Structures are given as structure tokens and as C-alpha cells.
């Protein structure tokens, strides 16, 4: 029996991801009458960084679908002491049915998954944030009717969220353009179009998206080079008439986006945040299918 981890979007076949999204829409439609898919099942969650949306959405997803979740504080469990990743993974596999982690070190997450007999879900590492991107894909489908052929333009830093957009672009067949300061171009995945020209990136875009210039753990960073990539009304005006503005949140007010844009009718940030809940349900359901969950 293979264990269904949800760690690297790039390793999935496109149809599986599309099926998960389809289920996310279906589960959203049952928002007030959620099927009790996770009855008797438990999720353990660990975070080595702060979280509002990821923590809440996973906890509520489990609860609404009849399951249970627990938060393991990294400073309280034995993992931070002398107990190894392997032992931790093997012991947790005997107690719960899935593990969701926010772990800065991506390799450590992979190691944990290697030793776990239950699904491990990536709640964000320093290099990727796949669950966020599933909610973003869902939001774009809702707002624009589909993903194929759409132009998604990213502005500012090249970070974990950017990487997951690039990973998703080949699965969902959209064009992804990242407008970044010149010195960050070397950090970018070769699979996406990179430019230093923010106006050109925004031109004819269907989605304008950004994220903080200071990801957690990068506090104290100099921001000067990012200001030409701030999402403001002038930049939004370059995009298609029905273009939407997205941000995974938390927003660093008002650096990477102006208050005017974040609170404009084009901004879908709160729908995007809500969709974390529905997407998590579908991701969990896919991961737990081997445990008997009907998808
Ligand atoms: N977007 C996101 O992952 O938010 P949190 O850090 O609040 O979980
Ligand atoms: N890039 C941000 C995303 C937060 C959800 C960070 O890593 O802090």
C-alpha cells in the first residue's frame, strides 16, 4: 500500500491535482452540510513558524468532516530533544492518520515522510507552499472560470509561494510571469518567464499576485529594490479589465501592495483565504483515501 504524501506539486500527475480541485469545489458546495468523511481519523500538526490560515483551515477541515486534530508544539515534543526524525515519524504513524507540518527545512520534511507510514502534508517549507497554491488554483477557477491559458503575473520576491506557482503552471497549463529585481533572477526556476519589467509583466494579465518581500525568518531584509514591484493602482491598470488581485496573506501593510488595491473590488484575498479550508479538505481526503475515506 503506497502512502500518499502531499509535499511536492511537481511530482503529481496533472489529473490527480485536477481531481483534488474538483473535490474541493464539491466540498465547498457542501459547506453547511459537510460529509463526515473523516470520522474516527486524526491529524497531527507541527509548526516551526507562525500560522493563522494554515493552522485554522486544517483544524477546522478535520473537525467539520468528523475527524480530530492536535497541535504538537515543537518545543514540547521529544523531536527537538534527543529523539530522531525516524522514531518520531514511526511513533506518530501508530497514533494518528496523517501529519501536517510547517517546517522550514524541506529536506527534514522529506526525511520524516520517508519514515512515516501515514501521509505527510507540506504546510509550507522555505522552498514551497503547495497547499496554498491549491487554494489559489481553486480561487482562480471560481473567479475566472478556469486556469488554462490564463496569464498569472507575480511581483516582488522569489519565494516558497512563487516556486509553488511555477510548479503548478505546468500542471494547470497557465502562463506564469515573475517580475523580480535583477539580482533575484538567478534564484528563479528555469520553468517560468522572468523579467525586471513590472509593467510588461502586468500587461494583459488575468491575475496579479504578490506576497510579502520579507518571508518569515528573513526579518531585517532591505526593501529598497522591491519598491518598483509594489502592486498599486497603476500596475493593476495594465492588466486585463476583469483581472483579479491575489495574495496568500499575511500582507505586510502596505509594502508589497497598496491598501487601495488590497481593498479594491478586484481583490479576492478573503475568498482565497477561505478557500484554504475547502482545499485542505480535498487534500486530506485524497491523502486519506487509503485509510478508507471516500473521495
Ligand atoms: N497563507 C498562509 O499560509 O498563511 P498562514 O501563515 O497564516 O498559515
Ligand atoms: N512567503 C511567506 C508566506 C507566508 C504564508 C513566508 O514564507 O513567510
Image (tube, helix red, strand yellow):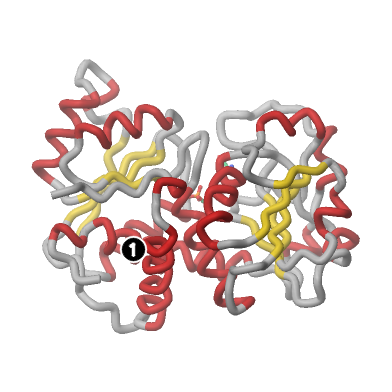
Residue drawn at x 81%, y 54% as measured from the top left: 201
Q: Residue at x 15, y 67 (%)?
A: 39
Could you tell me residue 126's position as x and y percent? 51, 34
Q: Position of residue 267 (x, y in %)?
A: 70, 68
Left or right of residue 264: residue 26: left
Q: How many marks?
A: 1
Quarter of the rendering containing residue 236: bottom right
Q: Secondary structure at mark 1?
A: helix
Residue at position x 34%, y 66% in the image: 282
Near-viewer residue (47 or 178): 178
Q: Residue lying furthest left in this view? A: 94
In the rendered structure, the answer to whether residue 167 lies left or right of residue 256 reads left
Snapshot quadrant of residue 89: top left
**Residue 169 shows in this picture:** yes
In this image, 22 relative to 159: left or right? left
Q: Is residue 33 positioned above or below 2 on the image?
A: below
Examine the rendered structure and indicate whether residue 190 appears above or below residue 232.
Answer: above
Which residue is labeled 1 in the image?
A: 60
Q: Residues within 10 Å of mark 1 (few under 14, many from 20)?
A: some
Indicate the position of residue 246 as horizontal and vertical percent values: 66, 61
Which of 84 and 106 lies nearest the eye of the viewer? 106
- Residue 200 versus residue 56: which sits nearer the camera? 200
The residue carrying mark 1 has its beta carbon less than 8 Å from ligand 1: no
Q: Quadrant of the image for the C terminus? A: bottom left
Q: Position of residue 125 (x, y in %)?
A: 46, 37
Q: Please say whether residue 123 is visible from this viewpoint.
A: no
Task: State the residue at coordinates (16%, 58%).
Answer: 290
Amino acid at each position: 500500500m503506497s502512502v500518499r504524501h502531499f509535499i511536492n506539486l511537481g511530482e503529481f500527475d496533472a489529473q490527480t491535482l485536477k481531481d483534488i480541485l474538483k473535490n474541493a469545489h464539491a466540498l465547498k458546495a457542501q459547506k453547511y452540510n459537510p460529509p463526515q468523511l473523516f470520522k474516527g481519523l486524526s491529524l497531527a500538526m507541527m509548526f516551526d513558524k507562525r500560522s493563522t490560515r494554515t493552522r485554522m483551515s486544517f483544524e477546522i477541515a478535520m473537525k467539520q468532516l468528523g475527524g480530530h486534530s492536535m497541535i504538537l508544539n515543537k518545543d514540547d515534543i521529544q523531536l527537538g530533544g534527543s529523539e530522531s526524525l525516524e522514531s518520531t515519524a514511526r511513533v506518530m504513524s501508530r497514533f494518528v492518520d496523517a501529519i501536517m507540518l510547517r517546517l522550514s527545512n524541506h529536506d527534514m520534511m522529506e526525511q520524516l515522510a520517508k519514515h512515516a507510514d501515514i501521509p505527510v502534508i507540506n504546510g509550507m517549507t522555505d522552498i514551497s507552499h503547495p497547499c496554498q497554491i491549491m487554494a489559489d488554483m481553486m480561487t482562480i477557477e471560481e473567479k475566472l472560470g478556469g486556469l488554462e491559458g490564463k496569464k498569472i503575473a507575480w511581483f516582488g520576491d522569489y519565494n516558497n509561494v512563487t516556486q509553488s506557482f511555477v510548479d503548478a503552471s505546468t500542471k494547470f497549463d497557465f502562463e506564469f510571469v515573475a517580475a523580480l529585481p535583477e539580482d533575484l533572477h538567478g534564484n528563479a526556476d528555469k520553468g517560468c518567464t522572468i523579467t525586471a519589467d513590472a509593467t510588461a509583466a502586468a500587461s494583459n494579465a488575468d491575475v496579479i499576485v504578490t506576497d510579502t518581500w520579507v518571508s518569515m525568518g528573513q526579518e531585517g531584509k532591505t526593501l529598497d529594490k522591491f519598491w518598483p514591484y509594489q502592486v498599486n493602482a497603476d500596475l493593476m491598470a495594465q492588466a486585463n479589465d476583469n483581472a483579479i488581485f491575489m495574495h496568500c496573506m499575511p500582507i505586510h501593510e502596505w509594502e508589497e501592495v497598496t491598501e487601495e488595491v488590497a481593498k479594491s473590488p478586484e481583490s479576492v484575498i478573503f475568498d482565497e483565504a477561505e478557500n484554504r479550508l475547502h482545499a485542505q479538505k480535498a487534500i486530506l481526503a485524497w491523502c486519506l483515501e487509503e485509510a478508507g475515506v471516500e473521495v
